[in-house]
Amino acid sequence: AQSVTQLDSQVPVFEEAPVELRCNYSSSVSVYLFWYVQYPNQGLQLLLKYLSGSTLVKSINGFEAEFNKSQTSFHLRKPSVHISDTAEYFCAVSPSGGSNYKLTFGKGTLLTVNP
Amino acid sequence: DVKVTQSSRYLVKRTGEKVFLECVQDMDHENMFWYRQDPGLGLRLIYFSYDVKMKEKGDIPEGYSVSREKKERFSLILESASTNQTSMYLCASTLLGGEQYFGPGTRLTVT
């Protein structure tokens, strides 16, 4: 079984400041890792994912996350946030083997970007 | 683009009613999922299906059932709605690599 801990339930920042949303996971097997974003009144959208290869993965809108196996972490970072980044962010993990592709989600981090 | 649609964005039902939430995906995905989302609790898996007529319980199946008669459609059924089932319900589907595609959600209020 897997579990995901998002260490901050809310993160308020000012526009153009850097931000880090923290995610730690627990698993007895190899995993895939994901960050999803949910804008107000919408479903979840995939932001970025780690399946294999380079441990640093990037999204098209400037976010990046680094898989750290020794620390079992997958923190999300952005060097300079915009008002439009205000949303809830969910970290998720799935086993890399098997056939059911179940995801286990963290409880979410609400990022609020203030002017 | 993968599209996952849900039959209603907002739904209001009375306690004891039977409620059907429908989800349709257009990408021939084998796996489909129903979650509920509550503030501070994140997403919790209710049921998932890995093939037509196949289903497995998730973490919180009590009070719910599901139906998958066709590959593209996965229905969530609340046999007798209760106020503690007031929530946001999200449907998702996936083919490979664990990446799930989500619908817009149905916000259900049970009064």
Image: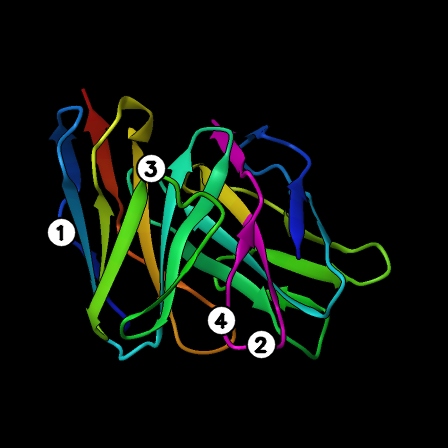
Residue placed under numbered mark 1 in the picture: B7
Q: Is residue B52 above or below residue B100?
A: below
Residue range highlighted in magenta: A91-115
The chain under label 4 reads: A
Residue wearing tag 3: A40
Mark 3 neighbour class, 10 Å CA radius: few under 14, some 14 to 19, many 20 or more: few
Q: Are marks 3 and 1 in contact (CB under 8 Å)?
A: no
> Gap in Å between the C-alphas at discs 3 and 1?
19 Å
How far apart marks 1 and 4 lie (CA) works out to 25 Å
Residue A98 is marked as 2
> Which amino acid type is marked by label 3?
Pro
Of labels 3 and 2, earlier in sequence is 3
Amino acid on which the number 4 mark rests in the picture: Asn
**Residue B14 shown left or right of residue A98 in the figure:** left
The quarter of the displayed image where residue B39 is located:
top left
Query: Which of the two labelled residues, at mark 4 and mark 3, occupies the earlier sequence position?
Result: 3
Q: Is residue B49 above or below residue A80?
A: below
Residue depicted at x 27% and y 46%: B105
